[in-house]
Amino acid sequence: ILPSPLLDLLGVFVLLHVITSINDIKQRIKTQKENHSTIGFVPTMGALHEGHLGLIRQARKENDTVVVSIFVNPLQFGKNEDFKHYPRTFDNDCKLISQEGVDIVFKPDASEMYPDEFCTSVILEHLEDKLCGKSRPGHFRGVAVVVLKLLNLIKPDIAYFGQKDFQQTVVIKRLVSDLHVDVTIKVLPTIRDQDGLALSSRNAYLSETEKKDAPCLYMALTKARAMVNTGIKNTEEIVQEMGKIVSQCKSGMIDYISVVDPETLESVPKVRSGDVALLAVRIGKTRLIDNVILMLLMALSWFRLC
Ligand code: PAF
């Protein structure tokens, strides 16, 4: 009789097909395509939480085969960022994934993804240097490269992303459209804790006190929504009020607060329905991001009538 943690692990690996080599994933995807199996893909960096599981569940509902990738992509971390410390919880991720009926986990090696001679970059002019790109230069190039590589390997019909990383979703949609990648990108709403804090693998870095401060991001966004609901459209006024809320939280340092067009990410002087309020705040040493889509009341009531 094996000790139960070992049984747990064996159970996980018997049910889940974990593929690590690029050749093997190509072969497996080729077979799926020959069988006319539709493929739903959820790319992740692991340290899975309910946000990821929501994407996986949606993928499970809508496709014959579900592939989840787990790869902490070195290319999207700056020199002084948290690549080394990023949470790596593979065994637990596998346990969670296996409960969701995922067919394939792709966990490539960095050395195979980025061999020494690798030198390709993907630049998204006008999108990569705004908002998060200002304080994380090179981040979105790293995201674009890895997502394009993964889409080329997995060839999914639908790929799923969370709205929490709003700028990332805009970059990926642009990339797919500009380069004619044959995939549908689905963006699902942010999953939050009861106090409003958007779920993120980086929340694991927060101390108990910081955890109490962190919901200030969502409080600021809720204020923006409330202001728009009362008819205020002036974004300068909205951003100022959001800033006041974040400033009340002791461990918070604002990186940016902005209201932008959802496609160009240009800041807008007056809110229109569909514009997005976003912010990045350092809570202690942890940089958190969040956003909400703003709807003018008239548009909201029209949606409710339909
Ligand atoms: O959102 C993430 O977890 C990552 O940026 C992604 C899309 C998996 C690319 O590494």
Image (spheres, rainbow, N blue to C red):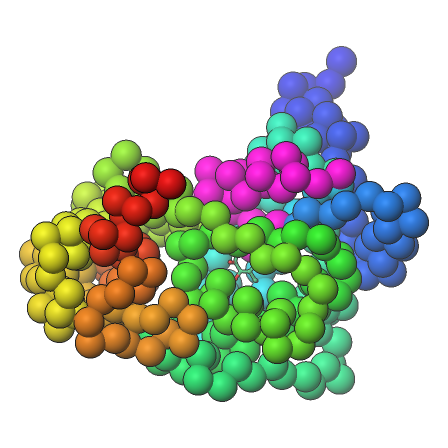
Residue 8 horizontal/vertical position (percent)? 66, 25
Residue 18 horizontal/vertical position (percent)? 76, 44
In the rendered image, residue 118 lying in the magenta stretch gets the answer: no
Q: Which residues are magenta?
A: 42-64
Q: Is residue 243 visible?
A: no
- Horizontal side of residue 133 vs 255, given as left or right: right
**Which residue is painted at 27% across and 57% down in the image?**
294
Residue 2 horizontal/vertical position (percent)? 73, 18
- Horizontal side of residue 195 vs 83, given as left or right: left
In the rendered image, residue 59 lying in the magenta stretch gets the answer: yes
Residue placed furthest toward the top: 1
Where's ligand 1: which quadrant? bottom right
Residue 22 horizontal/vertical position (percent)? 81, 61
- Horizontal side of residue 157 vs 136, given as left or right: right
Q: What is the quadrant of residue 92 in the picture? A: top right
Q: How many callouts does the rendering have? A: 0
Picture layout, residue 162 above or below residue 239: above
Q: What is the quadrant of residue 102 in the picture? A: top right
**Which residue is painted at 72% across and 81% down in the image?**
118
Q: Is residue 46 visible?
A: yes
Residue toward you, 118 or 84: 118
**Which residue is painted at 55% across and 67% down in the image?**
172
Q: State which quarter of the image contains the N terminus.
A: top right
Q: State which quarter of the image contains the C terminus.
A: top left
